[in-house]
Amino acid sequence: MKNKVLLLSILIMTSLSFSFTGDGVGIGDEAADFSLKNVDGKTVSLKDYKKAKGFIVVFTCNTCPFSVMYEQRIIDLHNKYASKGMPVIAINPNDKIKSPGDSFDKMVDLAKEKNYPFPYLYDETQTTTKAYGATNTPHVYVLKKTKKGNVVQYIGAIDNNAKSSEGVSKRYVEDAVDAVLNGDKVKETKTKAIGCTIKWAAS
């Protein structure tokens, strides 16, 4: 009970954003590729995944309570869909000065602790984050690989219950990925990304 009260207090105190994506890519747009440093020290790009049918790109971080609550669900998404050609690519967008707990070294520690099965990339310049238009952690972009590039099919939240996977009644990302894999049109293409605001570097 104490843990639930503490968590509720953290959520209330956390800076939140409940807005749709502003500038950046929209549904049907081609998402830019990137070359970002992974926690293993190597750089990762979407073009590295020759056999992928698409991607679940998740802007997330170490410190946001919402990202923490979604950690296992993000792992589960990768474990469910990577073998089907739709891996998770996680990107930490936060400035390490504004949020020291999101430094690269801290990312490495978390990835080892949680045994992340997917790449966890650091967008140190925040260029990729701005190109996509992400505003929150977590913020998800489901991409479909096509002849013209990786086309955005869905933008928004993972599901409709941040507090508990047991209370989820709508699995937005799973529905979108299933549609992509089945060759169907995604029915719900955009939802509100609920989470902490991204910690932008001082300009």
Image: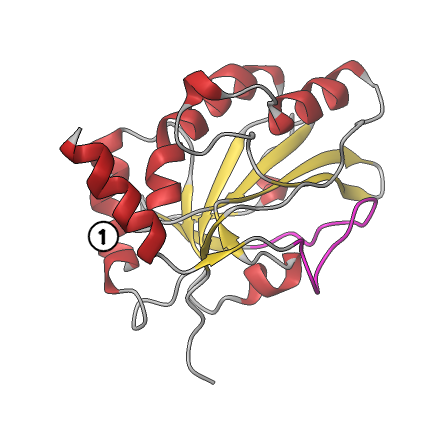
Using the image, determine if residue 161 lies above or below residue 137.
Answer: above
User: How busy is the neighbourhood of tag 1: few (under 14 within 10 Å), some, or many (20 plus)?
Assistant: some
Q: Looking at this view, is 54 or 193 the one in front?
A: 193
Q: Looking at this view, is 136 or 106 the one in front?
A: 136
Q: What secondary structure prevails in the magenta region?
A: loop
Quadrant including the N terminus: top left
Q: Position of residue 70 (x, y in %)?
A: 40, 33
| Residue 62 seen in the current view | no
**Mark 1 residue type:** Lys
Q: Secondary structure at mark 1?
A: helix
Using the image, determine if residue 76 lies above or below residue 26.
Answer: above
Residue 21 picture quarter: bottom right
Span shown in magenta: 20-34
- Can residue 143 be found in the magenta stretch? no
Using the image, determine if residue 199 lies above or below residue 104.
Answer: below
Using the image, determine if residue 136 lies above or below residue 126.
Answer: above
| Residue 97 seen in the current view | yes
Residue drawn 58% across the image and 46% down it: 193
Q: Looking at this view, is 78 or 6 the one in front?
A: 6
Q: Position of residue 68 (x, y in %)?
A: 33, 39
Residue 2 picture quarter: top left
Residue drawn 69% across the image and 62% down it: 22
- Can residue 30 be found in the magenta stretch? yes
Q: Position of residue 199 (x, y in %)?
A: 41, 66
Q: Position of residue 13 (x, y in %)?
A: 32, 57
According to the image, label 1 marks what residue? 106
